[in-house]
Amino acid sequence: MDEKRISHNRQSNRLQGYDYSSPGYYFVTIVSHNRLPIFGGIISGEVQLNRNGKIVKDCWLEIPKHFQSVTLDEYVIMPNHLHGIVKINENQNVWARHKVSSLRRQASPYSANDQNTKPIGTPSHSLGAIIGSFKSVAAKRIHKAGLIKDQFIWQRNYYEHVIRDDEDYQRIVQYIQFNPINWEEDQEFIANELQNR
């Protein structure tokens, strides 16, 4: 998969005026803080999740329990990032028991400038709320387990791409599926290696 075709500059590239609570498919990439490989490793082209990675996986798979109009599609958890496709379905108003605003009120002691929760003003059924909620819950569980203490788990922002058509969808699915095999050529791997030199 040509990395240039799926650019992850991690800058906010949200489409001006686009409603990110609209039904549709969204490709997201969420990166660990400072791109540290805290979720596991790659052995022979296969992801080997550690305890942090397993917590992240559990939290990711639980998203539809808390946001009933969300369906998860292809995803992969890499050593220092997660790629996934999130589908927001038509029935947006049936958002479940889990309110992201309550997560803000129960913020962890590590989140005084909480980089793991959604920004104030994000609609509770939008992509930003979904990802903010996921990041917050995963960070809190990792902290509670005592696996990582007194530091952020996630980069402040995340990358998103609105999937426009079937060709775009197939290209992204292939990219996600081949990500572990291409780990050593992945931008996140390269950025991490350069950072640690």
Image (cartoon, rainbow, N blue to C red):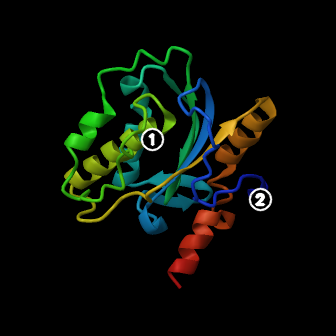
Residue at 63% over, 43% down: 16
Badge 2 marks a residue whose secondary structure is helix
Amino acid type, label 1? Ile
Measuring 29% from the left and 35% from the top, which residue is drawn there?
Answer: 101
Q: Mark on residue 16?
A: none
Q: What residue is at 64 percent from the left and 57 percent from the top?
A: 8
- Give the Cα distance between marks 1 and 2: 24 Å
**SS for dot 1:** helix
Q: In the figure, is residue 43 to the left or right of 49? A: right
Q: Residues within 10 Å of mark 2 (few under 14, many from 20)?
A: few
| In the displayed structure image, the side of residue 113 where residue 24 appears, left or right | right
Q: Is residue 158 left or right of residue 165?
A: left
Q: Position of residue 50 (x, y in %)?
A: 39, 55
- Is residue 141 or residue 101 the one in the foreground? 101
In the image, is 60 to the left or to the right of 186?
A: left
Q: Nearer the viewer, residue 113 or 66?
A: 113
Q: Earlier in the sequence, mark 1 or mark 2?
A: 2
Q: Which percent across, then down, holds residue 85?
A: 59, 36
What amino acid is found at the position of numbered circle 2 in the picture?
Lys
Q: Which residue has dot 2 on it? A: 4
**Residue 149 falls in which quadrant of the image?**
bottom left
User: Going by the picture, which residue comes out furthest to the bottom?
Assistant: 197
Crowd class of label 1 (few under 14; some 14 to 19; many from 20; radius 10 Å): many
Vertical arrangement, residue 74 with respect to residue 189, above or below: above
Q: Position of residue 110 (x, y in %)?
A: 23, 59
Q: Mark 1 highlights which residue?
A: 131
Image: 19 above or below 189: above
